[in-house]
Image (cartoon, helix red, strand yellow):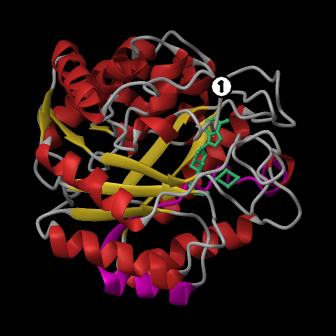
Amino acid sequence: MQMETIIQQRKLDADVLQQLLLHDQWDTILQQTADKVRRLVYGDAVYIRGLIEYTNICKNDCYYCGIRCGNKRAIRYRLDKEEILSCCKEGYALGFRTFVLQGGEDPVSTDAWICSVVSAIRERFPDCAVTLSIGEKKKESYQAYYRAGAVRYLLRHETANPAHYRHLHPASMSLENRKRCLYDLKEIGYQVGSGFMVGSPGQTVSNLLEDLQFLQELQPDMIGIGPYIAQKDTPFAGCPNGSLQMTLRLLSILRLLFPYALIPATTALGTIHPKGRELGLQAGANVVMPNLSPVRVRALYTLYDDKICTGEEAAQCRHCLEQRVRAAGYRIVTDIGNVKREK
Ligand code: SAM
Ligand code: FES
């Protein structure tokens, strides 16, 4: 009973968070309170973002990721500018007003090219926002993309614990640089998104507490979490996937800690459970990111095994999500969907 009051008053200090993460007896009240908070701030609105996975070529070798450079079995692709623009055109007709360009750290996609793609999208679709999710770059590069018209950037910190970061990544990458990128992005003026995988190999509850603490320091506008899912051609093949329950629990905690955040119900969540995204929305998420990439490349962006929605056309995905969102008790909104801020 006392814990119920604590949850309802949103007094989530480290001890309480630990209890919530370790035990399932608070799950129902946690979820109900998160939904209440989300409805107070965002009502029943669910924002949609059109995801364009424009390249699966990456110079990095993150051990959990199916498109890491070390995976010699991956069939590589890169969309050209016209292909990206035609994804946007199709998305625009379906009501999308945000396009998320995501990809590996592809050395051929130069800053000049990225800027030209961003400015072409902004020119042709002036009432739309462009979000980038293209990894770790120099501050000057981020500044150039911003000047070209990108206003939002997604870069998960992945884990806030240095030893865990080392377990998941090769020596060429560092948590320090990841954090530097996030703070550079904030300083430039981007709406910044960060986040982590739930149940990544070696992750402990104490790591999750550090993740929540880091997010509280960073105060991102968007927070992306989803279950870790094994990919067969990675060093972590065969590791257990992150759990639905823990992901939902964390979504609710995030909604309580960050009432104003834009939090997606991710494709990974929909992959580990047929109703994963609906459950994610009911746990506190308020964004969905259907895929706008051409069908011929969808199955090649295999971050993890058995990814859903790789065979459907954009219109089918849009229609399917509309129904899922409605069935979950919410409503898709097609405006630009900027983050609300505390007054
Ligand atoms: N290269 C960019 C970056 O590093 O931010 C964007 C692309 S990266 C593939 C996008 C996200 O996919 C990563 O931040 C990671 O959290 C997630 N991801 C990668 N492998 C995954 C896996 N096996 N299971 C679940 N999520 C995964
Ligand atoms: Fe670069 Fe996954 S290792 S996108």
Return the residue at label 1.
305
Q: Locate the N terminus by quadrant.
A: top left
Image position of 181 with respect to 303: above or below: below
202 left or right, relative to 248: right
Tally the numbered discs. 1
281 left or right, relative to 59: left
- At label 1, the amino acid type is Asp
246 left or right, relative to 327: right
Query: Front-most of 193 and 123?
Result: 123
* x and y percentages locating residue 209 in the rendered image: 63, 42
- Classed neighbour count for the residue bearing mark 1: other residues with Cα under 10 Å, few (<14), some (14–19), many (≥20): some
Query: Front-most of 219 and 230?
Result: 230
Image position of 209 with respect to 201: above or below: below
Image position of 226 with respect to 154: above or below: above
Q: Which residue is depicted at the point 21% across and 42% down?
A: 47
Residue interval drawn in magenta: 139-165
Q: Locate the C terminus by quadrant.
A: bottom left
* Image quadrant assignment for residue 41: top left
Can residue 18 be seen here?
Answer: yes
Q: Which residue is depicted at the point 33% across and 36% down?
A: 290
* x and y percentages locating residue 73 in the rendered image: 79, 39
Can residue 11 be seen here?
Answer: no
Instruction: Report if residue 30 lies within the magenta region.
Output: no
Which structural element holds mark 1? loop
* x and y percentages locating residue 273 in the rendered image: 49, 13
Q: Which residue is depicted at the point 85% across and 67% down?
A: 172
* x and y percentages locating residue 332 in the rendered image: 14, 33
Confirm or reject: label 1 Cβ below 8 Å from ligand 1: no
Q: Which residue is depicted at the point 58% across and 26% down?
A: 21
